[in-house]
Amino acid sequence: MLEKKKKMLFHKTNIEEKLSILKEKTISEKEVLNQVYEILKRESQKEEHITKRLKDSKNSTTNTFTFDELESHRIFHISQIQKICIDYRLRFLDSRYFKGKIPQAAISEVKRLEKIHRTEIKGFKIMAPSKLFKLEDKDDPLLFAPIGNEYYYLIHKWGNDLHPLRKLLVWPFKSIVNLALTTLVISYFATLLVPNGLFSKSNTSAEFWMIFFFMFKSIGAVVIFYGFALGKNFNPAIWNSKYFNA
């Protein structure tokens, strides 16, 4: 009986109930909904404004960042960006040329940085493969903003990493010397595939080098035709060019 009386005296506290009672005392449900709606509306407007700036981004040399809030591992000089672009045959262009979809995470990161640094970020740049400036793909774009003196701040990276062999695959396009060496190597291995005695009964070194010279001319002609026909250029010439046939 005593235990029953104790239970009646000491009811368990329902926190949700207490919270609801306090809310009713301080603010009405309608006012809560209105406040939440206004907050969400302001946040949505901020995101729309950022998306518009990303699509209409124009050249800007600097942004007013708070120095103490910058993360050093996100700061890159234009020479470092240029080297990576040339090594991996990427482009570094204004975000308005980017035709892929910029994820919500990148927009949220811009919004977060603008709140921390109390500034409106402009002059967005994107580093990505050339084709991503024409259509969507799954490679890894990087979003940058200038901070002055040819330094850029990495805001966000999305997508998958580049293929591990991409640097090797695009190495021939770094310069005309690289392309010539690649053509020579391919011609040499193509010559080795020619069966012995195909053109004559005797297998001499002179015959080998004649076939090699023929292979080099043939493969070289295909490479030149491909380059001119598709308007291709070497990596150092395209890394910051907005033209397709630069």
Image (spheres, rainbow, N blue to C red):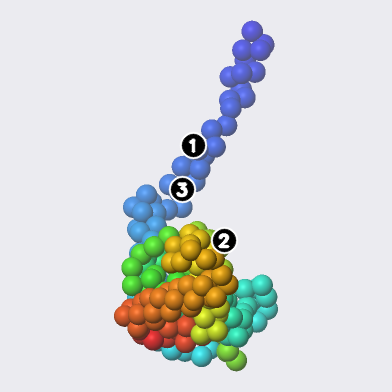
Marks 2/3: CA distance? 57 Å
Foreground of the two, 23 or 186: 186
Q: Which of marks 3 and 2 precedes in the sequence? A: 3
Between 96 and 191, which is closer to the camera in this rendering? 191
Give the SS element for disc 2.
Answer: loop
Q: Earlier in the sequence, mark 1 or mark 3?
A: 1
Q: Secondary structure at mark 3?
A: helix
Residue 147 lies, with reference to residue 28, above or below; the image says: below
Where residue 123 sits in the image (x, y, percent)? 45, 84
From the image, state whether disc 1 or disc 2 is nearer to you: 2
Work out which residue is located at the far front of the displayed protein and give it: 201
Residue 233 image position (x, y, % from top left): 43, 83
Asked if residue 129 shows in the view, the reply is yes
Q: Which residue is mark 3?
A: 23
Picture residue at 50% right of the left edge, 38% below the top = 16
Question: In the image, 132: left or right of 158?
Answer: left
For the C terminus, the quadrant is bottom left
The residue to which callout 1 is attached is 17
Label 2 crowd (10 A; few <14 / some 14-19 / many >=20):
few
Residues packed near mark 3 inside 10 Å, few (<14), some (14 to 19) or many (20 plus): few
- The amino acid at mark 3 is Lys
What residue appears at the point 61 percent right and 12 percent down from the top-left corner? 4
In the rendered structure, find residue 164 and report the number of the disc placed on it: 2
Tag 2: amino acid: Pro
Mark pair 1, 2: CA separation: 57 Å
Q: Amino acid at mark 1?
A: Glu
Image location of residue 20, percent across then percent down: 46, 42
Circles 1 and 3, Cβ within 8 Å, touching? The answer is no
The part of the image, by quadrant, that contains residue 230 is bottom left
Quadrant where the N terminus sits is top right
